[in-house]
């Protein structure tokens, strides 16, 4: 019974891999950045500070910028050999009011090579109307415009210093 169950699980895993089904979740406990993906495969998602170095906490300085960086993003559905990513980015205060909102940072593009679209960066300023000492919730959603159910969602709370 155990052998047949193991074989069944191995067969299902191989089938899902073969059809390109990719799902997962991850969390960086140092920064609190969490992400999940469905349909894409991804090597790394990280929070980068103004020095373009991976952050080691969720504390950010006022009047700087921060980025959520996605590396190794694959499995786009290509159209004319181009990938068409979408990227929504919001930053909300403790009351849920959005201080930054963009429905699609890639709204007016003509597509990218799969290689160029494998590294995406959502950069946002830390400044007015943000307040020192307050925590802000950042959400980023990346999707494949040619297959909308293929997506990656990332979230993090940032403390402004």
Image (cartoon, rainbow, N blue to C red):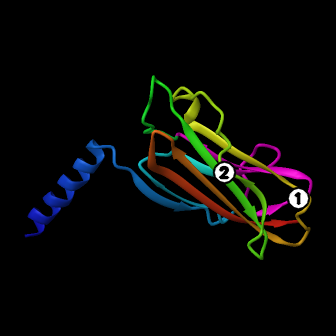
Q: Quadrant of the C terminus?
A: bottom right
For the point 79% across and 70% down, the residue is: 93
Q: Inspect this view and state whether residue 75 appears.
A: yes
Q: Is residue 74 magenta?
A: no
- Viewer-closest of 140 and 8: 140
For the point 27% across and 50% down, the residue is: 16
> In the displayed structure, would residue 70 be above or below residue 60?
above
Residue 159: % across, % down: 81, 68
- Viewer-closest of 105 and 54: 105
Disc sitting over residue 33 in the figure: none
Residue 39: % across, % down: 41, 48
Q: Inspect this view and state whether residue 57 appears.
A: no
Q: Dot 2 corresponds to which residue?
A: 103
> In the displayed structure, would residue 64 be above or below residue 33?
above
Label 2 sits on a secondary structure element that is loop
Q: Point out the tag, 1 or 2, that comes first from the N-terminus.
A: 1
Q: Which residues are magenta?
A: 47-72
Residue at the far bottom in the pictured view: 95
Disc sitting over residue 61 in the figure: 1
Q: Is residue 60 magenta?
A: yes
Mark 1–mark 2 Cα distance, whole angstroms, equals 25 Å
Within 10 Å of disc 2 (Cα), the crowding (few <14, some 14-19, many 20+) is few
- Viewer-closest of 23 and 3: 23
For the point 90% across and 57% down, the residue is: 127
For the point 62% across and 46% down, the residue is: 87
């Amino acid at each position: 019974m155990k052998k047949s169950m193991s074989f069944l699980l191995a067969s299902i895993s191989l089938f899902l891999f073969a059809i390109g089904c990719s799902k997962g979740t991850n969390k960086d406990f140092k920064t609190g950045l969490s992400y999940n993906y469905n349909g894409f495969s991804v090597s790394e998602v990280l929070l980068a500070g103004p020095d373009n170095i991976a952050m080691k906490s969720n504390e950010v300085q006022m009047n700087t910028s921060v980025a959520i960086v996605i590396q190794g993003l694959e499995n786009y559905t290509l159209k004319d050999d181009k990938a068409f990513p979408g990227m929504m980015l919001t930053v909300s205060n403790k009351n849920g009011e959005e201080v930054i909102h963009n429905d699609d940072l890639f709204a007016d593009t003509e597509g990218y090579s799969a290689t160029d679209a494998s590294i995406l960066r959502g950069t946002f300023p830390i400044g007015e109307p943000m307040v020192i000492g307050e925590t802000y919730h950042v959400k980023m959603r990346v999707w494949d415009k040619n297959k909308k159910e293929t997506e990656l969602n990332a979230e993090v709370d940032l403390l402004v210093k």
